[in-house]
Amino acid sequence: MKTALHIKKYDLIITDAEIKGSFVFQYLEDLKTMAKDSPIIVMSEIDQEAIVSTAKKIGVNEFISFPFTQLDINSCINRYL
């Protein structure tokens, strides 16, 4: 991840931040540090207010919880591109 983010600036980053049932805040913090100017959209099965709030404090721009539609994703992407 570090190499890819140092080589190129991305217009938008879309990621899932859940690994084997655990929500990974350190991953999001690292991602935001390395891609300061890139908006980040997180998709996750987890929809707990405390998790969403912490992710937003880290700098995540959008948090989309499953289930969602293609229209939901497109609308979110269009806000940042």
Image: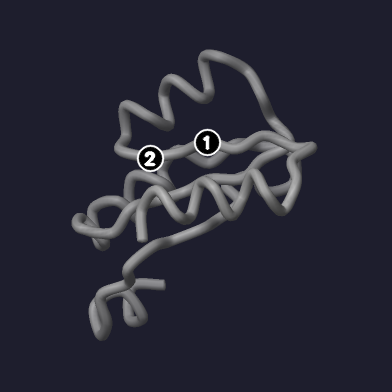
Residue 56: image location, x then y, percent: 38, 29
Residue 36: image location, x then y, percent: 20, 55
Residue 49: image location, x then y, percent: 56, 14
Q: CA distance from mark 1 to mark 2?
A: 7 Å
Q: Which mark is residue 27?
A: none
Q: Check the image and report above or below for 48 versus 20.
A: above
Residue 19: image location, x then y, percent: 67, 48
Left or right, residue 31 beside residue 18: left
Tally the marks.
2
Q: Residue at x 41, y 24 (%)?
A: 54
Front in this rendered view, residue 56 or 23: 56
Q: Are marks 1 and 2 in contact (CB under 8 Å)?
A: yes
Q: Check the image and report above or below for 10 versus 17.
A: below
Q: Which mark is residue 60?
A: 2
Q: Residue at x 48, y 55 (%)?
A: 77
Name the amino acid, label 1: Phe
Front in this rendered view, residue 62 or 15: 62
Q: Which mark is residue 63?
A: 1
At numbered mark 1, what does the secondary structure look like: helix, strand or loop? strand
Q: Residue at x 41, y 46 (%)?
A: 28
Dividing the image into 4 quarters, which one contains the C terminus?
Answer: bottom left
Q: Residues within 10 Å of mark 1 (few under 14, many from 20)?
A: many
Q: How is the image coloured?
A: one colour
Name the amino acid, label 2: Val
Q: Residue at x 20, y 58 (%)?
A: 37
